């Protein structure tokens, strides 16, 4: 297996099977790790059934809803400890991130870059969003990029493909944010370690089925967390394991 895709889920019973099948149908040596937060709608049971049907599907069960940031921390930690895939990817479970972009992102990661499925480079964009949400999202990315000093167009996307060695050096257990704010925090650590981000354009389509997980408290955490990341010096790249 060359690439393992980590997919956090909470109430994604209508999406997880077709998404897994779409990923596994790509011309890639690929596996899927579903990280389910004890979804009341039975997503975890569907994931277990998929794992029984296809050895490329794996499931990590968590006791309850604990946030996107912790799902990625635990999912990546589990993947690093139990699989030898040289590339690890992440994406939303609701088809907002197009699976067909994965091969191009894998190619970027093969070159040693952290690949980003980006809405905010030439060729990228969003679909089924109102004007207010477009302004909020674009403004949030400009804000995060400015505070952290990162030359990246889309820092709030959860669609990425990582070289394994980058994740091994990020000190994942100390990533402080619980929700979406973990995404720019991990990007900032990547930058401090000297790795390059490459952005591949995607069209982000608002979720096909289900309800958005973004809440006001998550947005506030994201707004404040970038200052903690920038000035608290919670990560020392000189102490990271060697490349």
Image: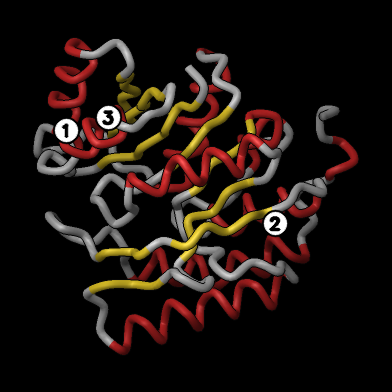
The residue sitting at 57% across, 59% down in the picture is: 199
Residue 142 image offset from top left, x and y in percent: 59, 79
> Which one is in front, 154 or 146?
154
Q: Is residue 213 left or right of residue 113?
A: left
Return the x and y of residue 39 as percentages of the image width and height: 18, 37
Front in this rendered view, residue 152 or 132: 152
Looking at the image, is mark 2 or mark 1 nearer the viewer? 1
Name the secondary structure under disc 2: helix
Residue located 67% across and 54% down the image: 197
Seen in the picture, residue 137 relative to 5 is either above or below; the reply is below
The 10 Å Cα crowd at callout 1, few under 14, some 14 to 19, many 20 or more, is: some
Name the front one of labels 3 and 2.
3
Task: Say whether residue 166 is visible.
Answer: yes
Outermost residue toward the front in this view: 27
The residue that label 1 is drawn on is 17
Residue 208 horizontal/vertical position (percent):
15, 58
* Residue drawn at x 71%, y 67% as measured from the top left: 150
Which circle, 1 or 3, is nearer the viewer? Answer: 3
Residue 67 is at least partly visible in this image: no
Residue marked by disc 3: 25
Which numbered disc flags the more N-terminal residue, 1 or 3? 1
Res. 188 mark: 2
Percent across and percent down for residue 13 are: 12, 39
- Horizontal side of residue 111 vs 3, given as left or right: right
Q: Residue at left 85%, top 28%? A: 242
- Tell me the crowding category of disc 2: few under 14, some 14 to 19, or many 20 or more residues within 10 angstroms, Cα based: many
Colour scheme of the picture: secondary structure
Q: How many numbered circles does the render carry?
A: 3
């Amino acid at each position: 297996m060359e690439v393992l895709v980590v997919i956090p889920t909470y109430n994604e019973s209508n999406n997880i099977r077709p998404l897994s099948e779409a990923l596994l149908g790509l011309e890639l040596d690929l596996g899927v790790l579903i990280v389910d937060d004890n979804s009341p709608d039975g997503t975890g049971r569907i994931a277990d059934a998929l794992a029984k049907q296809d050895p490329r599907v794996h499931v990590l069960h968590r006791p309850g809803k604990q946030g996107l940031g912790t799902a990625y921390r635990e999912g990546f930690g589990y993947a690093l400890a139990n699989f030898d895939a040289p590339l690890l990817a992440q994406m939303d479970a609701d088809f907002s991130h197009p699976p067909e972009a994965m091969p191009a992102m894998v190619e970027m990661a093969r070159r040693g870059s952290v690949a980003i499925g980006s809405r905010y480079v030439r060729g990228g964009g969003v679909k089924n969003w109102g004007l207010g949400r477009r302004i909020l999202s674009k403004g949030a990315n400009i804000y995060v990029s400015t505070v952290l000093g990162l030359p990246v167009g889309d820092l709030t996307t959860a669609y990425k493909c990582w070289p394994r060695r980058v994740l091994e050096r990020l000190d994942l257990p100390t990533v402080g944010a619980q929700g979406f704010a973990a995404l720019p925090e991990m990007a900032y650590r990547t930058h401090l370690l000297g790795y390059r981000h490459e952005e591949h354009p995607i069209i982000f389509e608002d979720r096909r089925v289900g309800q958005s997980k973004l809440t006001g408290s998550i947005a506030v955490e994201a707004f404040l967390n970038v200052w903690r990341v920038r000035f608290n010096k919670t990560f020392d790249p000189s102490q990271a394991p060697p490349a």
